[in-house]
Image (cartoon, rainbow, N blue to C red):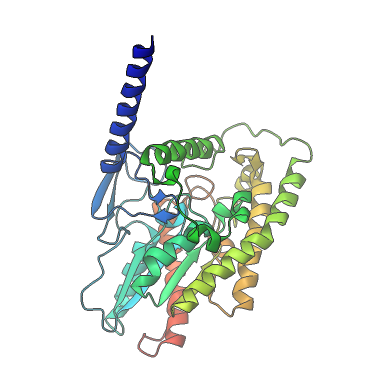
Amino acid sequence: MARRIGTALLLLLFAAGAAELMLRLWPPFGIRVQGDRIELPTEVDDVIRGSTLPGTDPVIHLYRNRLGLRGPDLPRDTAGLLRIVAVGGSTTECMYLSEGQDWPALLGARLAEEAAYGRRTWVNNAGLDGHSTFGHALLLEDHILPLRPQVVLLLVGANELGRIDLGRHDRAQWRTRPRTWAEHSALLNTWRIWRQARAVREAGIGHHALDLHTTAAPLVPDSAQAQLMRERGLLPAYRQRLEGLIELCRGKGSLPVLITQPCIASNVADTALARRLMDLPLLTGTDGRTLLLRLELVNDVTREVAAAQHLPLIDLARELPGGPVNYYDAFHFTKTGAAAVAARCADRLSTYLSARDRQYPAR
């Protein structure tokens, strides 16, 4: 019996070691967060087949350049190059839009049209699906700010909803403490990421086609008020994190441009569709009406911080039309929606840049 138990333990240790090695060499889920670090896979071309999301292609190509970002590689000659990097979560990354269809790529194409009359521009997409302002801080410190971008676009808001866990982290303490053995383990990191992905799907936050004809289920009594009260309690921590991102960017000479987060239920011209979206469960346990109110609380903080810090603000939450033309679910853009975001960002950004930079063409 003792020999059998010993043999079983040795086999278990061997299997765990083999799994650890395999997951380090070939991570199955594209894990980009390892403990307190962000590791970006470089020069990879991922293919997603069979997408049924409305407003997207059935076959999607996602290419990561030498920096691990979406967009063109940084040219060797950077003299006079205006470097712009978009930072955000899934609504920035646009995982289900092929190369050239995500809004940062379309923004880069629009700004490139003006480059013939003035300064060359380079735009990259540093969006990471599921990331919030805490992840943005790590990404900026480790990967983005060393590139010395003149402009950092921050589309924030969707992943801040209900994020009570972020308030417990002190970034300085988190970055200076020794990494635990669990944070070094690819096996445990894979299991943790799988659990988080499952929790996200169960909460209805992941990518999915929104059925506008589903039966609207009423919220539990007082649920909306409880959600709003909880969201209000999280706003001071969000403000502090956002101000920390601004301080990071300014400390390296980058201009942060804040962008509010829109959703499918905002700015809907069709009255019948607007009423329908207000009653639909856009997230698990949250109808469109409550989601809009919660999101507006977060967006108001973004607007207040931009005004207090004298920063450019692109208020997509009040400008981008809602409805299924621009969104395939509560937050994520279709190809048409990404083009609309790029058009608004290009217009506002060109105005800011022409006023700030004499080398940029005036509009």
- Residue 93, placed above or below residue 312: above
Residue drawn where x is 56% and y is 69% of the image: 244
Which residue reaches farthest right? 222
Location of residue 262 in the rendering, given as x and y in whole percent from the top left corner: 55, 57
Quadrant for the N terminus in the image: top left
Closest to the observer: 140 or 235? 140
Residue drawn where x is 61% and y is 51% of the image: 161
Closest to the observer: 22 or 234? 22
> Position of 258 compared to 276: left or right?
left
Location of residue 220 in the rendering, given as x and y in whole percent from the top left corner: 74, 35
Q: How many marks?
A: 0
Quadrant for the C terminus in the image: bottom left
Q: Is residue 23 visible?
A: yes
Q: Is residue 162 visible?
A: no
Location of residue 360 in the rendering, given as x and y in whole percent from the top left corner: 36, 85
Q: Residue 4 lies in what quarter of the image?
A: top left
- Residue 76, placed above or below residue 335: below
